[in-house]
Image: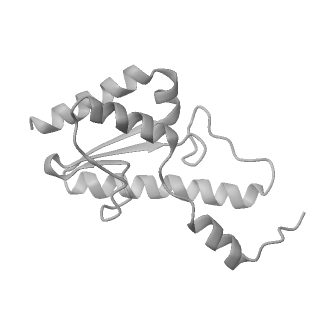
Amino acid sequence: MKNPKTTEERSRMMGKIRAVSKLETLVTNELWGRGYRFRRNVRSLKGTPDIAIKKYKVVVFIDSCFWHLCPVHGKIPKTHVEFWTEKLTRNQERDREVNEFYEEKEWNILRIWEHEIRGDFEGAIQKMTHFIDKAKHK
């Protein structure tokens, strides 16, 4: 089935989608409630980290199992296989590039999977708080 939208229309529609998810809001509200202060979706930092604390050189990315092709849950959709394979593979390449960027600059980078948060919310929060606390004391 042909998509009735032109490339420009589709691009404009996709551009209106904001980068904040409900899951991210749950996580950041919990961290804020525990006294952690940070900025969300910092566009001035490479990769637009979900959580950033510049003072401690900390960036946290909450990776969606679908968009980042999680090794446990990530699947290529059955339609438009070539498009999705290229798109999701490029997302993974970009993640590696972002990781290398922060590692070279000696930042503390944490990537946490969506399924980790959904499966054990408290455990995921503890993983993040431990990571941030460790960076504070470097």
Measuring 22% from the left and 36% from the top, which residue is drawn there? 36
Left or right, 41 with reference to 77: left
Quadrant in the picture for residue 137: top left
Image quadrant occupied by the C terminus: top left
Question: Residue 103 placed where, x, y %?
Answer: 26, 51
Q: Nearer the viewer, residue 4 or 115?
A: 4
Image quadrant occupied by the N terminus: bottom right
Measuring 53% from the left and 30% from the top, which residue is drawn there? 115
The outermost residue toward the right is 1
Give the vertical position of 17 relative to 132 (above or below).
below
The outermost residue toward the left is 137
Question: Residue 92 placed where, x, y %?
Answer: 51, 52
How are the colours assigned in the image? one colour
Give the vertical position of 122 relative to 49 (above or below).
above
Quadrant in the picture for residue 28: top left
Give the vertical position of 58 relative to 30 (above or below).
below
Question: Residue 105 placed where, x, y %?
Answer: 20, 57
Left or right, 2 with reference to 105: right
